[in-house]
Amino acid sequence: MKDIKWQGSAISVEPPKKPKKITGTHFPTIIGVNPFSSPFEAWCRCTRTYEIPFEGNKYTNAGQIIEPKVFDFLRTSMGYGDRVITPEDVYGKDHFKKTRGDFYPNVLIYGGMWDALINGEDGKPEYVVEIKTVQVDGRSGSLEDRWKNGEAPDYQALQASLYAYLLGVDKVLMVAVALEDKKGDYEHPEQVTPSYANGNVYIDEFKVSERYPNFDMYIEVATAWWNNYVMTGISPDFDEKKDAEILKALRTN
């Protein structure tokens, strides 16, 4: 744990020599459109001050099992065939370890991993693919709450948009697979088959330049946030309720 100085509703640490990059997960948080995270949480991660421990559960397990099924859906049902490129196709097995979770090593501030690419006829990436599982019932809300009118919520769409932007690609293909607790989808994700016939696949295809015509402004906001907070070691304001878990860990240790 770093040496922390408490300054009212903020904290400060010695600026990290090698901070963690802004990934697609935290990019929407930083620009203020992710209701499930906070800029303070993103700052703690980027500065290596504290990161909430990852704990696998039935939801993350289902996502890992269903992702290869979506690759097959893209190849067959959507007709993209061998134009679908997976991380393993590019980096081989254990791609996370080989890349340390960053497919953009030459980018200074931004990084992360795309789920898949779809190449164009010229063999170059045409689409960035982002795969999600969406809970139909239960604590995460209904499908209608998460994917209104078949459109991915901004905090997910912006994640994919960042990865497309970093690749110089304008097209994004969001694929959501709807899962239901009461049907046992999370307990037995190996039995789930994403298909139009099953009615459990939802597609949101868009151009970054059309959905987010001011995307460059988002990059400017996130870059300024990086310079103002990560590079100085001074955090944005924390929220005692939203950041309660992190604050408890920091104060305890």
Image (tube, grey):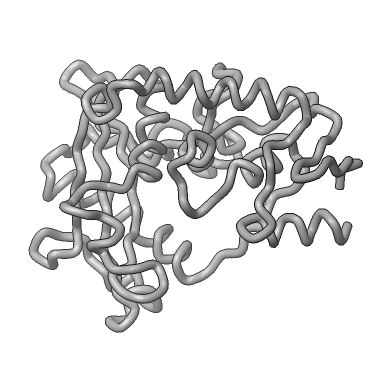
Give coordinates of residue 238: x percent, y percent: 68, 47
Furthest residue in direction left, as rendered: 197
Whether 108 is drawn above or below 62: the answer is: above
User: What residue appears at the point 69 percent right and 57 percent down from the top-left corner?
Assistant: 240
Number of callouts in the render?
Answer: 0
Furthest residue in direction bottom, as rendered: 182
User: What residue appears at the point 44 percent right and 67 percent down from the top-left corner?
Assistant: 59
User: What residue appears at the point 47 percent right and 52 percent down from the top-left corner?
Assistant: 35
Give coordinates of residue 232: x percent, y percent: 76, 24
Furthest residue in direction right, as rendered: 3
> Which image quadrant for residue 172?
top left
Position of 200 compared to 239: left or right?
Answer: left
Quarter in which the C terminus is drawn: bottom right
> Which image quadrant for residue 144?
bottom left
Whether 26 is drawn above or below 119: the answer is: below
Instruction: From the viewer's side, name the closer residue of 168 and 121.
Output: 168
User: What residue appears at the point 61 percent right and 30 percent down from the top-left corner?
Assistant: 21
Furthest residue in direction front, as rendered: 8
